[in-house]
């Protein structure tokens, strides 16, 4: 049975559950299937290597952060054939996140709204999960570790949380992503402002330099930004990335815009909107970033990829790599191979 057909049969069962309950069912099921060797039938996409940030990616299609916040399901996710897996966002201390319900499907728009709020078990538990994964132990592929700040850390102390997490995850990461763009942690997006961003990147770059000496290994840092920024902000962010020699930028996170889902059930729920409605918003940011950055650093394109054609559009806009999240929920695991094949052509 093809993976497309299998997912077509499974999806109605998953969609009958509350979205967070479906998430909490699907990931352990995937982990068990991988442990039993049942995912071998999926087959890996053909090799299509790209070298970005000095890292060799087996293919240019990665998993975006957010699906596995605690790094507890890396081996199961690796079985889906991604060229890279990004887990997190993790914070220094464990936190429950926002009250439930906090995740909503909008099938009509192929979209999801979430206001999870960086729910995770804390960076020490996260690192233990990463270390326990066969993917990490056997150096099977590219592993991105995504870091954030605790909800109760004042914004003026945010850099302390990021540096703390960077120090903890550095030895285990292929690259580290600094998430300053979730709309679900109060004031977090303030860190995209010119002076705040300069201060944060300076501290992170200093920590990266010390850690590279300490571990005799350079681990690239990427910055994940929001789609809800104007041309002036893009210009400022691009300038800061170049000035501080940041290794890459991930464009983009979820949006606060609601124009595409107006009038739909759950359309006015608070939180970040992901899926098809973010596709063009993120492409606009990618194109503008590429115009500002030139070839100074690579862009990883994420937001609303629902098909191989969408993945190619992200590359055409200026991305070097792409990441999937909501598209997996709507199209299933076959989307990974479809995107890899589209980017080979």
Image (cartoon, grey):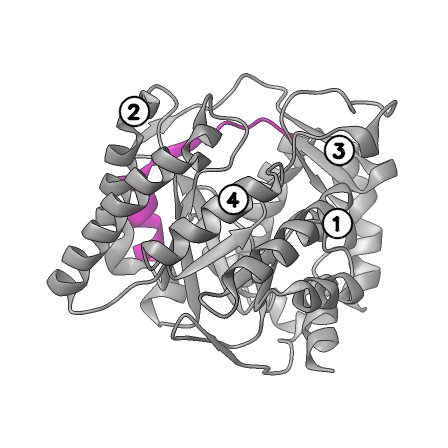
The reply to whether discs 4 and 1 touch (Cβ–Cβ < 8 Å) is: no
User: Of label 2 and label 3, which has the lower sequence position?
Assistant: 3
- Who comes first in sequence, dot 1 or dot 2? 2
Residue bearing mark 4:
225
Q: Residue furthest left?
A: 214
Residue at which label 3 appears: 105
In terms of secondary structure, where does tag 1 sit? Answer: helix
Task: Looking at the image, tell me whether mark 4 or mark 2 is earlier in sequence order.
Answer: 2
Tell me whether circle 3 and circle 1 mark residues in contact (CB < 8 Å). no
Along the polypeptide, which appears first: circle 4 or circle 3? 3
Q: Report whether 173 appears left or right of 88.
A: left
Residue drawn at x 39%, y 58% as measured from the top left: 242
Is 131 within the magenta? Answer: yes
Residue shown at 57% from the left, 66% from the top: 321
Whole-angstrom CA distance, mark 3 to mark 1, is: 20 Å
The numbered disc on residue 280 is: 1
Residue 161, image x and y in percent? Answer: 28, 34
């Amino acid at each position: 049975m093809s993976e497309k057909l299998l997912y077509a049969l499974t999806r109605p069962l998953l969609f009958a559950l509350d979205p967070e309950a479906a998430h909490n069912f699907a990931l352990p099921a995937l982990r068990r299937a991988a442990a039993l060797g049942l995912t071998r039938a999926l087959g890996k996409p053909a090799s299509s290597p790209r070298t970005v940030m000095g890292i060799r990616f087996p293919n240019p299609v990665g998993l975006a952060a957010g699906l596995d916040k605690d790094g507890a399901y890396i081996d199961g996710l690796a079985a889906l054939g991604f060229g890279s897996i990004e887990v997190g966002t993790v914070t220094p201390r464990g936190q429950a996140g926002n009250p439930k319900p906090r995740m909503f499907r909008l099938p009509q728009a192929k979209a999801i709204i979430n206001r999870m709020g960086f729910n995770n078990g804390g960076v020490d538990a996260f690192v233990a999960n990463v270390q326990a994964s066969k993917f990490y132990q056997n150096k099977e592929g590219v592993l991105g570790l995504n870091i954030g700040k605790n909800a109760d850390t004042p914004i003026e102390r945010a850099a302390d949380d990021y540096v703390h997490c960077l120090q903890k995850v550095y030895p285990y990461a292929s690259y580290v992503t600094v998430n300053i763009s979730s709309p679900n942690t109060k004031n977090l997006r303030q860190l995209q402002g010119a002076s705040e961003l300069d201060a944060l990147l300076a501290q992170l770059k200093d920590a990266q330099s010390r850690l590279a000496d300490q571990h005799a290994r350079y681990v690239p840092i990427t910055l994940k930004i929001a789609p809800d920024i104007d041309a002036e902000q893009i210009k400022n962010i691009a300038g800061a990335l170049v000035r501080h020699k940041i290794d890459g930028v991930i464009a983009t996170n979820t949006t606060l815009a609601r124009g595409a889902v107006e009038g739909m059930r759950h359309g006015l729920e608070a939180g970040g909107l992901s899926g098809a409605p973010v596709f063009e918003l993120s492409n606009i940011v990618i194109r503008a970033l590429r115009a500002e950055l030139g070839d100074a650093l690579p862009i990883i394109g994420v937001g609303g990829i629902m098909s191989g054609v969408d993945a190619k559009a992200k590359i055409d806009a200026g991305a070097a790599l792409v990441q999937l999240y909501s598209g997996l929920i709507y199209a299933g695991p076959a989307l990974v191979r479809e995107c890899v094949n589209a980017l080979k052509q």
